[in-house]
Each structure stands twice: as C-alpha cells, then as structure tokens.
Image: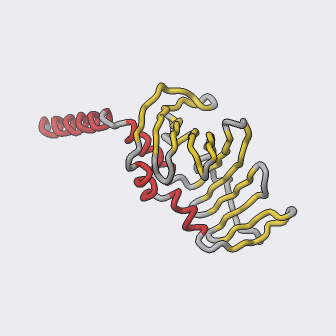
Amino acid sequence: MRMITKTLAGLSLALTCSLAAATPKDDLHASFTKFLKAHSFRATVTDLKKGEQISTMEFVAPDRYRMKSAKGPAQLIVGDTMYMDMDGKLTRMPIPGVSRITAQYRNEDFLHQVEGDMTVQALPDESVDGEPASVYAYTVTKPMKSDAKTWISKKSGLPLQVESSGSFMGHASTTRVRYSNFDDPSIRIDAPN
C-alpha cells in the first residue's frame, strides 16, 4: 500500500511539474488545438485602424461557412460550393477546391507550420467582455509575417479574440477577430434548396 501511495504521489508531482513547466508557446498551442476541434463558432472581424466592422462569420464543422462582409454580399460555403446573395436570392457558384483552401486553416499540420518559428510572450491577464483571459503576444512569419496578440478564456481555454498587424499585397492592416458561441447547436448552415 505504501508503494502505491508513493507511486501515485510521484506521478502527481511529475504531472504538476510538467504542467508548471508549460511555456507560453505551449499554452497558445493548446488553445489553438482546442479551437481546431470546435464544432461551431461565430466570429466578427474589425479593422482597428478604421474602427469599422469588416465582416461576420459563422462556422460549422467540417466545411460550412456563412460570411457577410460590411460592403458586399452574404456568402455561404458548403463543401466545394459557394452560394452568393444576388439581389436577395442565394445563387449557387461551384468553386472546385474551395473546401481544400478553407480546410487548411482548420488543420493541425497548418498550425504546426505556422508555429514553426513563432515567438510567444505571456502578457498580464485581462478580460474580454468581462471574461477573464490569459494574454499572449507573438510573431509568425508563415504564411506571411504578422504580429499578433491573443486573449484565451481562462474558463474554456478557447481564444476569445485575436488582434494582428501585418501587410498583404502591399496594404498594412490591423484587425481584431472576436470569437463567440463555440459549439452552439443553434448555429446551423445548410445548403439552400
């Protein structure tokens, strides 16, 4: 009995030490991995320089998106088919390969590629809409260089928001993506009839 107690105590200590030794990069990776496993969520994208909402999005795994840009038509993506709102009617637009393009952003291999040379720094805790969050600043170089900051819910371990600054096709931007409603069964995206 004493041997079992010592063994369990040793395992408990080892687990505690390994958890305590987690780096900020490990914490961020754990949150992103959990994010990739989410069945559904909502996101709002804001241009921080202009102070304008750019778009909203809903996602349902594995390959369904509902997007609405502030200055464009609403779109649904279901697999390899996009439906675009044309004068109040969703028009089918087959786009071969679109599911492969969107899937790369929900793929652990892509996550590992992005994290390859990422540097991460833990910042003081903050809250997002009253929800306590751990905050991390980091720089990635793939697929393009970007400086980012992520707020991770202390309760769920999921990202609450990500702010990133970078340049794409010669245009500098700073955006905020605010996430909500993870695994909400009311989020449904079906192909129109």
Relative to 85, say whether 169 is above or below: above
Relative to 94, say whether 184 is above or below: above
Relative to 71, say whether 178 is above or below: above
Residue 125, position as x, y percentages in the image: 49, 27
Whether residue 174 is visible to the viewer of this picture, yes or no, is yes
Q: How many marks?
A: 0
**Front-most of residues 54 and 99:** 54
Whether residue 178 is visible to the viewer of this picture, yes or no, is no
Residue 84, position as x, y percentages in the image: 76, 64
Residue lying at the far right of the rendered structure: 87
Relative to 103, say whether 176 is above or below: above
Please say which color scheme the image uses: secondary structure
- Determine which quarter of the picture holds residue 109: bottom left
**Front-most of residues 173 and 92:** 173
| Quadrant for the N terminus in the image | top left
Residue found at x 63% / y 42% = 173
Going by the image, does 30 lie left or right of 22?
Answer: right
Residue lying at the far front of the rendered structure: 170
Residue found at x 53% / y 35% = 151
Going by the image, does 30 lie left or right of 2?
Answer: right
Residue found at x 47% / y 34% = 136
Residue 177, position as x, y percentages in the image: 62, 43
Residue 190, position as x, y percentages in the image: 70, 65
Residue found at x 61% / y 28% = 130
| Quadrant for the C terminus in the image | bottom right
**Front-most of residues 54 and 160:** 54
